[in-house]
Image (spheres, rainbow, N blue to C red):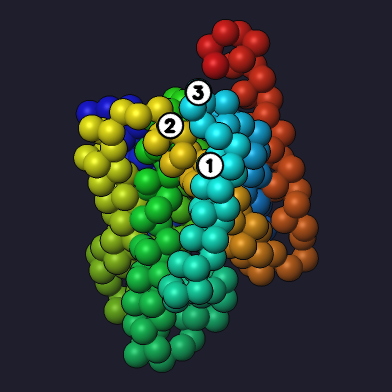
Amino acid sequence: MSVPLILTLLAGGATFIGALLGVIGQKPSNRLLAFSLGFAAGIMLLISLMEMLPAALREEGMSPMLGYGMFIVGLLGYYALDRILPHAHAQDLMDKDLHRAPRNLKRTALLLTLGISLHNFPEGIATFVTASNNLELGFGIALAVALHNIPEGLAVAGPVYAATGSKYKAIFWAGISGMAEILGGVLAWLILGSLVSPVLMASIMAAVAGIMVALSVDELMPLAKEIDPNNNPSYGVLCGMSVMGLSLTLLQTSGIG
């Protein structure tokens, strides 16, 4: 099994951590959840704009028009998909969900599972493609995806557990959303494994960069603010950028990157 695929599996599997937190009654504070979402957004923004897109544009045979065009395709594609899919609202992370009628909770849980699963699918592709092109960047994207998968697993498991009283069902439905990400990575591995064109890979990288930027700006940062209105999500974003930038600098200066 390839390392990029393993990273995708681990990133998707982080959903189970959130699911476990949702059923054992030790939910992290909203402040910590919001910070982790901002931190993940910071990692994604820095890698996408400072590493992935420039690397795609530097590829031999890649024209600026194609590179930037694919970046815009990724941006617009994410927003188009986001308009179609049901949203996982931050309120569903809160304890007040536990006071709703079980029937409403079941509906909320199903919508959350569907919405998060469909959003996770392209993230699995993004993680695999990035790691295939640059393993160090792949580690960064996998870390960012794993960090924001924990609150997502919590968002699904909490309502399901409250509605059914079953920890197994809660973990199962939360796991489904994480499996969608793993499925995206596996399909990318099966389909892209035979496609070795550097220009094609660079084009996909540019589109993935667009998806990651849109995900950070449209989903992660607003969600962080919604979960913890009293704190600025920019702190987490700046910390994520700083940590990722420092790690990439150390890798490059040491000759590893």
- Amino acid type at circle 1 is Leu
Task: Provide residue 116's location: percent of width, then percent of height.
Answer: 41, 65
- Where is 27 relative to 242, above or below? below
Please state the horizontal and vertical placement of residue 128, each as a whole percent of the image. 37, 38
The quarter of the picture where the C terminus appears is top right
Q: Residue at x 24, y 41 (%)?
A: 191
Residue under label 1, please give it: 66
Amino acid identity at mark 2: Val
Residue topped by disc 3: 60
Rendering coords of residue 42 (x, y %): 65, 44
Report how far apart the C-alphas of labels 2 and 1 lie in the structure.
10 Å
Mark 2 residue crowding within 10 angstroms, few (<14) / some (14–19) / many (20+): some
Badge 3 or badge 2: first in the primary sequence: 3
Amino acid type at mark 3: Glu
Mark 3 → mark 2, Cα distance in angstroms: 7 Å
Left/right placement of residue 100 relative to residue 230 reads left
Q: Position of residue 29 (x, y in %)?
A: 61, 59
Q: Residues within 10 Å of mark 1 (few under 14, many from 20)?
A: some
Q: List the residue tagged with mark 2.
A: 199
Q: Secondary structure at mark 1?
A: helix
- Name the secondary structure under disc 2: helix
**Residue in the picture at 61% in, 31% down:** 54
